[in-house]
Amino acid sequence: MHLSTEFRILAASDVHADAAARKAEGWRYVQMLAVNNEDSVDVVYSYMKDGLLDNAVVEALPRDARLASITDVYLEAFVCENEIHDLFGIPFDGLAIDFLGNFYRLSTESPMTIISPEKLAEQEKQRKLAEKKAKAEAAKTAKAAGEAASATDAKADAAALDAEMEAKLAAMPPEKAAKVRAAMEAKVKKQAEDGRDA
Amino acid sequence: MGSFHLAAMTLKSLFSKPETLQYPAEVKAPYAGQKGHVVNHVEECILCGMCQRTCPCHCIQASKPERAWTIQPFMCVQCGSCVAACPTHCLVMDPAPTAIATAKHEVRQEVPEQEKAAS
Amino acid sequence: MGKASVIPFGPQHPVLPEPLHLDLVVEDETVVDVLPQIGFVHRGLEKLVETRDYNQFIYVAERICGICAMGHSLGYAETVEAFMGVEVPARAEYLRVIWHELSRIHSHLLWLGLAADAFGFESMFMHCWRLRERVLDIFEKTTGGRVILSVVRVGGVNRDIEDSELKAICGVLDGITDEYQQIMDTLLTDMSVKNRTVGVGALTREQALELSMVGPFARASEVAYDVRSFGRGAYGALTDFQPITDAQGDCYARVKVRCEEVLQSIRIIKELSAKIPAGDISVKVKGSPEPGARAANVLEQPRGECYYYAQGNGTKFLERMRMRTPTSQNLAGMVEALKGCDLADVNMVILTIDPCISCTER
């Protein structure tokens, strides 16, 4: 028997039905946990059967969401559900042993949803770093894109210029036109050489 | 039958040397690798601050402008991560436990200027 | 049928130092209902991941519980290694398992002593703790700490054990085995012990499965679930590993399962120290976990399966670290085991379940 771990998404409305179905199939309840995001909470339900540790993730629950309790199916979940209620402020409907927010004696309400100043500072630092990196990256890509663009632009411009020049040249006296043409050819040749060097 | 075993064991311990030490009179010598307390050999310290950054309980301060290295021995948990991180190996874990004190205190060591012989 | 009354049990109770509170609903002398309550020592250690980076948090993880310190640091390290993609050297894995099994021996001996003390068998308590002291001495010699070992790190272990030292450890364990077997014989054949434990707080296999129980508590009810049998890490090198089970599911069965697990752990340590490969003991771990990287992991603690979850957020601090300890899983089973027992047996039932409340609350 080998242990394998899986993560999958579960809709908030299917939590209870999923637990009941698993109970019928003989899955063992492992745990429940909540993860605090910026303005939402993820709840992870874990079950195990034959070495498969399956983690069903209910993603991005809003702060005022309610979940259905699974304690009528798996009584042992009461510890985790009370804990999530106290620490993350997500209430459960139909909790078998409900401590009504007195499971832990807390000085602040739902402490795990408060983002500590240290974390904010770290996030800020990371954001700045990322910005700096992004800027550097952007500058780099802009430069690269600029080069590429200038190459294509040059061609397009040259074509447009050619058309324009042809029109002008048609209106010019022939010997002047020949001179201008020679000068332009030399210019294009030089540009091409420069491009190769670059 | 079972109780007989235990009686024999108890009887044996009646006549053998005690397993315990009579503490203040007899003190167990610490093992060589035991985690007692952190000691800084300041003459080799370059005040790089690696110990300060790696310490999980923020009990070390290495200040370059003041040329001082400070540790709060009663906040230290003897995890040994500073000793492992020290680039000059001037931090060592001394096997003797932190001395008993009546108040929490900090140990401040002045770090002398390094001679830049190597460079 | 007498009138129902409620008797509070704990959080301060002579039978166990853990702050567990029970409201026992009793009719005459029989417990009819139980309401467990914890929450007296919640320390919010999970929140500390925000201020301690993933290398430093290992020292916090260790301090969740004094008895399972090695287990928690190991479980945490394995979980972080899983999503950082770290390959731990084989020697480090063997050393981790050797220390972990030693800590299982010390945990079970501590529990056995306390259980004997609860029976009123105080000379047994002294003998158990005398043997436990030798295990702690091994820890002191090899890791530098008695209880908090600080020896595991993300990517390996901090210290090596010399091969000669491993031989010496096996020698000490041989000495323990001999005396331990005598203690075990005494405990398991003693009439007064049997009177207190046989048939008390029995749970059937169906109940154990129904309540998702873990650890020796479940194995005493014939649920052959042990995380070690997945064979991860150095456990995969064992020639044969069978979870120790018993069919009765009562207090006596739980005592028996734990007693035999000590001998099993000694066998594991001996086998692994004979097979241990030479090589590095740690690898360097660089960088920070990817944002959204997560891993779930289980580990067999002395008290049963412990679940770990870690999630990264791109910084050196983790987004979330979570441990679900075995006692949290077994609380519902404990309630079930207590229903119908005599008031005088309550402490026996609780003790044989061996709850670790400080672990559970973190």
Image (cartoon, coloured by chain):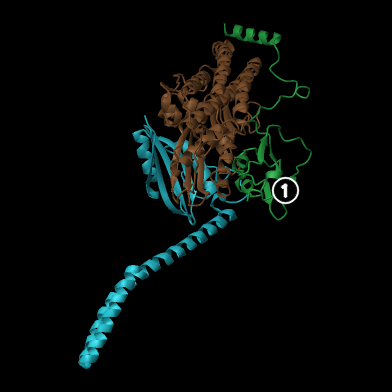
Chain colours: A cyan, B green, C brown
Tell me which corner region of the image, top left, top right, bottom left or bottom right, holds residue C195. Answer: top right
Position in image of residue A115 (x %, y %): 55, 54
Q: What residue lies at 55% left-to-right and 55% top-to-bottom?
A: A122
Q: Is residue A95 visible?
A: no
Q: Residues within 10 Å of mark 1 (few under 14, many from 20)?
A: many
Pick whichever, C219 or B78, lies toward us: B78
In the displayed structure, A129 sits above or below C148; it is below
Q: Is residue C246 visible?
A: yes
Q: What residue lies at 60% left-to-right and 23% top-to-bottom?
A: C135
In the displayed structure, C311 sits above or below C307; it is below
In the displayed structure, A166 sits above or below B107; it is below
Tell me which corner region of the image, top left, top right, bottom left or bottom right, holds residue B57. Answer: top right
Q: Secondary structure at mark 1?
A: loop
Q: Tell me the residue that label 1 is attached to.
A: B111
Position in image of residue C212 (x %, y %): 44, 32
C21 left or right of A39?
Answer: right
B7 left or right of A74?
Answer: right
Figure disc tally: 1
Which quadrant of the figure contains the C terminus of chain A? bottom left
Position in image of residue B92 (x %, y %): 66, 38
Pick whichever, C22 or A176, lies toward us: A176
Q: Badge 1 sits on which subunit? A: B
* Amino acid under disc 1: Val
Q: What residue lies at 40% left-to-right and 35% top-to-bottom?
A: A48
Position in image of residue C265 (x %, y %): 50, 22
Tell me which corner region of the image, top left, top right, bottom left or bottom right, holds residue A56. Answer: top left
Pick whichever, B102 or C98, lies toward us: C98
